[in-house]
Image (cartoon, grey):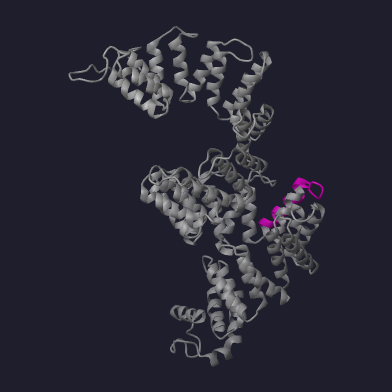
Amino acid sequence: MVRFRLFSVLCAAGLMAGTLGGCASGAPDGFWARGLAGHHYTEGARRKLEGDPHAALGAWARAAEAGHAKAWYQLAHLYGSEALGPRDQAAALTYAREAAQGGFAPALHYVGASLLHGWGGLDPDPAAAEPFLRRAVAADMGRARADLGVLLLNRAGGRQDPAAWSARVEGLSLLREAVADDDPVAAWRLGAVLAEGTHVPRDPARAVALYADAMEGGEFRAALPLARRHVLGDGIAPDPAAARALLDRIERAGPGHVRVDLARALLDADDPLPFDPPRARRLLERAATEDGRVRAHVALGKLLAEGAPGVAPDPAAALSHLRTAAAAGNGEATRYVGVLLEDQGRPDAALSWFLEAAGQGHAHAAVEAARILLDRGDSASARQAVALLAGVAADHDPAALQLARVARDGAGGTLPPDPALARRWFEHVRRTGGRVAAAQATNDLARMVLRGQGGPADARAALALFHDAAAAGHAWAALELGRLYDTGVPGIAQDRQAAWHWFREAAARGVAQGHTALAKALIRDGQGPEAIRQAFAHFERAAAEGHAWALVEAGRAAERGAAGQPGDPAVARAWYERALAEGVDAAPGALASLHERGLGVPRDDARALALYHQGARAGNAWATYKVGAFVAEGRGTPADPDAARAWLTAARADGVDQAADMLGRLERGEVGPFGPATGSGPRLRIEVRPAGF
C-alpha cells in the first residue's frame, strides 16, 4: 500500500516519466523496474552529490518501487532532513520501515533511533524503538549499540530495583563495546554518563578523554560538553582558551544542529559557556538561512521577539522566523506566535494559534489554550479546556497539574469541583511526574488531605506528604510544615522548635512568607530589644521579597508592643502607610483603626470612615463591615440604615460574624436614628463617601 501511494504521488509530480512505460499502466512494471533498480539507485546517488535532491528523489523512488531496500532508506533520509523543504519525519519513518522489512541494518537503526529520540518532533516511543535497535545490533550495526545502550540507561533511571540494575549493566556494556569499536557517538554518550554520575561514579577526567575522542571521530555534539569542562576545570585544568577554540570550531565547521545547540547555550545565562547573544544570533541566522534548520528559526524568532544585550528586539523579523517554523509544522513556533499575540492583548487570536500548536502535538500549547478558555468563564469554553487538558495530561505534567486544580476548585461557577478526581490526578503526577512536578503535586495533595477534600481529613498523612514534598525541594511544603508544627492540629503535637526549623528552611528556599513567620514567632516568643530587631529585620526581608502583607504584620506588632517592649502607634502608622502604598487591602483599615481610636493621631471618625471605605473598595471584608457599622451608627457621616444594611450584608456574606450581629441590632432599632427599615414613606439617602474622599 505504501509503495502504491508513493508511486501515485510521484506520477502526479511527473517524476516517473523517465521509466519504461511511465505511469500509463497505473503501476510500475515489476520486471522492467527490477532490471533498472540498480541504475536508478546509482542515478539518485549521483544527483544527490550534484546538489539536486529533487532529482535524487525521483531516481531513488523509481529504485524503491522496484524493491531496492537501500533506496527506501535514502528516501527516508531525504524526508528526514530539510533537503526537500520542511522536514517530514513521519514520511521518513514510513520509508525507513519499508527498508527495514527486508532486514536492512541501517534502516533498522534509523527506525529505532527515530522512535527513541523523537526525531522531527515525533513523540519518543522507546518501547517501539527497542526491537528495531536490537535487530540492528544483531545485524552488527555498530552505531545501534550506542542508541540501545542509551535506551536501557534511560529505562533504569535512578532506580535500584533488579530490573533497573539489569538494564543499567546491559546499557553500559553496549556503550563500552561501541567505544571499543571507535564509535564517536558512543564515546560522546558514555562521556555524558561519566560526567553526570547517574549510573556509575563520576569520572570527569575519563569523560573529558571520551569527549575528545568523539570530537576526533567527527562527533561535534561532544564539543559543547567538552568546552564546558574546560571552562569549569572539571576533569581537566581550567582552560578558557581551549573552550573558545572549541566554540570557534563549531561555528566554523560544525553541522547546523550543533550550531543551533551552541547558540541556545550562549543565550542561557546559567550555562557555564559565556553569555553572548550577538554571537548566538549570528549562529542562528546561518543555521536558518544556510541549513534551513527549523529549530534555528524558532530560537531566532524568540531572540528577536524578546531582545537581549547586544540584540535589539525586531518584532517583524521575529514573527517572520516563527511563521516559517510554524509553516513547517513546528508546534513550539506556533505556540510562541500565540504568546506574542497574547502579550499584545489579543487573546482570541492567540487562542487560535495555541489550538493549532496543540493539534500539532505540542502539549504545553494545550495548557496555554486551556488557560485562555478557562478565563472566558462560560461552560462551553470550560468543557473545551478540560478536554484539551485531559488529552495530554497522561504524559504532560503541567497539563495534569492544571487539570487537577480545575477539578479541585471548579471553573468559575461553570464546572463544579470534583475533589476526588483532583486527588487522582495529583496522585498520578506524584507517581509518574518529573521531580519538580511530583513535588508540586505532593504538596497540593497534602493540602487536600489535611482539609479533607476528596476524602477523609488525615493530618498525619498530610504531614508525611508535606515532608516528602519538602525533601524533594518544594519550598512551600517547608512553610506548610512550619505552620503545622507551630499551631499543632489533632494528631500532630505542637512543636515550636520544629516549626522554627521549617520556617527558616522556607525562608532559605526563597519563600518570603517564611520570613514573616519567623518574625511573628520572635514577636510571640522573644524577649528584649534584640528579638524586636531580628523580628523587624525579617518583616523587612519578607516585604523586600514580595510579601507585602508583612508590612501590616509589622504595623500590628509595633502597635501592640512585643517581646516585652511597649507599643508605638507612630511606628505602627509608618508601617501601615508603607503597606497602603503597596496596595495591601488590609492597610486602609489598619490606619482607619488608629484614627478611630485616636492612637498616635487625633481621633477623627470622618477620616477613619474614608479609610475604611478605601479598604472596602479594595475587597477587604473587615473594612466592609466597619463601613456598614459607621453608616449605621452615624459616625463620620449621617446615619443611613438602608446603606448600612447593604454594606453589612456584603460583609456577612464574606464571613464577618460581627456583621450579622450589627444587622440584628439595626433591625431591632438599637442603632441609628431611623429604627427598622420597614413601613412606607421617603427615606433619607446619605452619600456614603465623606466629603473630599
Q: Relative to 506, say whether 627 is above or below.
A: above
Q: Relative to 106, say whether 314 is above or below.
A: above
Residue in view at x 80 percent, y 53 percent: 201
Taking depth in this image into account, of 173 and 330 the one nearest to the observer is 173
Looking at the image, the residue that sits furthest to the top is: 602
In the image, residue 208 lies at what x, y percent? 79, 55
**In this orientation, does residue 297 appear?**
yes
Asked where in the image residue 157 lies, by quadrant, the reply is bottom right
Q: Relative to 49, say whether 196 is above or below.
A: above
Q: Give the number of callouts.
A: 0
Query: In the picture provided, is 379 more to the left or to the right than 558?
Result: left
In the image, residue 421 lies at what x, y percent? 49, 50
Q: Is-magenta flag for residue 233?
A: yes
Asked where in the image residue 219 lies, by quadrant, the reply is bottom right
Taking depth in this image into account, of 142 and 288 the one nearest to the observer is 142
Taking depth in this image into account, of 548 and 158 the one nearest to the observer is 158
Image quarter where the C terminus lies is: top left
**In this orientation, does residue 334 appear?**
no
In the image, residue 260 lies at what x, y percent? 61, 56
Residue in view at x 43 percent, y 88 percent: 24
Asked where in the image residue 287 lies, by quadrant, the reply is bottom right
Looking at the image, the residue that sits furthest to the left is: 681
Q: Is-magenta flag for residue 476?
A: no
Q: Relative to 404, say whether 524 is above or below.
A: above
Query: In the picture provided, is 278 more to the left or to the right than 359?
Result: right
In the image, residue 139 lies at what x, y percent? 71, 77
Residue in view at x 45 percent, y 20 percent: 588
* Chief SS of the magenta region: helix
- Residues in magenta, as a range: 231-251
Taking depth in this image into account, of 363 and 467 the one nearest to the observer is 467
